[in-house]
Image (cartoon, rainbow, N blue to C red):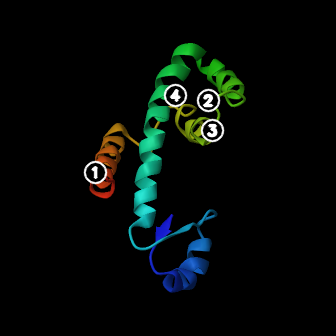
């Protein structure tokens, strides 16, 4: 998600393409950041729900794989379940790149941004 002048984006796109698969030019400066904050704000409740619900319903560690397989075909389906949790629930220390303090920071930034950019 990139914001900035289209002609500059066109120049840097090949470089970005070397390490990114999904590249979206969204408009002027700040557009990418705005959508990224919105994405994190939308994702946060789902991450919390999956972190709480999945282990509680799955029981034993081996059952988590089965639960993910089933839920991936239900309304809980999505990248958070099939990709994100595959990197967090199924490793020993359950490390995550989107810690609660980072989640809170992004939610606060989103709220601050949305208050400035939405009309009453």
Q: CA distance from mark 3 to mark 1?
A: 29 Å
Q: Quadrant of residue 3?
A: bottom left
Residue that badge 2 annotates = 76
Q: CA distance from mark 1 to mark 4?
A: 28 Å
The reply to whether residue 99 is in sight is yes
Q: CA distance from mark 4 to mark 3?
A: 11 Å
Instruction: Please tell me the numbered disc located at residue 115.
Output: 1
- Do labels 3 and 2 touch, CB within 8 Å? yes
How packed is label 2: few (under 14 Cα within 10 Å), some, or many (20 or more)? Answer: some
- Image: 117 above or below 105: below
Residue that badge 3 annotates = 78
Which of the pair 11/30 is nearer the observer?
A: 30
Instruction: Please tell me the numbered disc located at residue 50.
Output: 4
Instruction: Name the residue rendered at 56%, 73% in the picture.
Output: 16
Q: CA distance from mark 1 to mark 2?
A: 30 Å
Give the mark nearest the N terminus, 4 or 3. 4
- Do labels 4 and 2 touch, CB within 8 Å? yes
Measured as percent of width and height from the top left, residue 1 is found at 51, 63
Q: Quadrant of residue 24?
A: bottom right
How packed is label 4: few (under 14 Cα within 10 Å), some, or many (20 or more)? Answer: some
Q: CA distance from mark 4 to mark 2?
A: 8 Å
Give the mark nearest the N terminus, 1 or 2. 2
Which of the pair 86/41 is nearer the observer?
A: 41
* SS type, badge 1: helix
């Amino acid at each position: 998600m990139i914001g900035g002048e289209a002609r500059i984006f066109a120049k840097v796109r090949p470089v970005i393409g070397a390490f990114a698969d999904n590249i979206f030019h969204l408009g002027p400066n700040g557009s990418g950041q705005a959508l990224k904050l919105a994405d994190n704000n939308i994702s946060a409740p789902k991450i919390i729900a999956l972190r709480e619900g999945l282990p509680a319903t799955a029981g034993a560690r081996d059952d988590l794989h089965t639960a993910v397989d089933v839920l991936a075909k239900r309304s809980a389906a999505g990248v958070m379940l099939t990709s994100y949790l595959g990197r967090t629930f199924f490793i020993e220390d359950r490390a995550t790149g989107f810690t609660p303090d980072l989640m809170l920071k992004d939610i606060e930034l989103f709220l601050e941004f949305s208050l400035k950019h939405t009309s009453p």
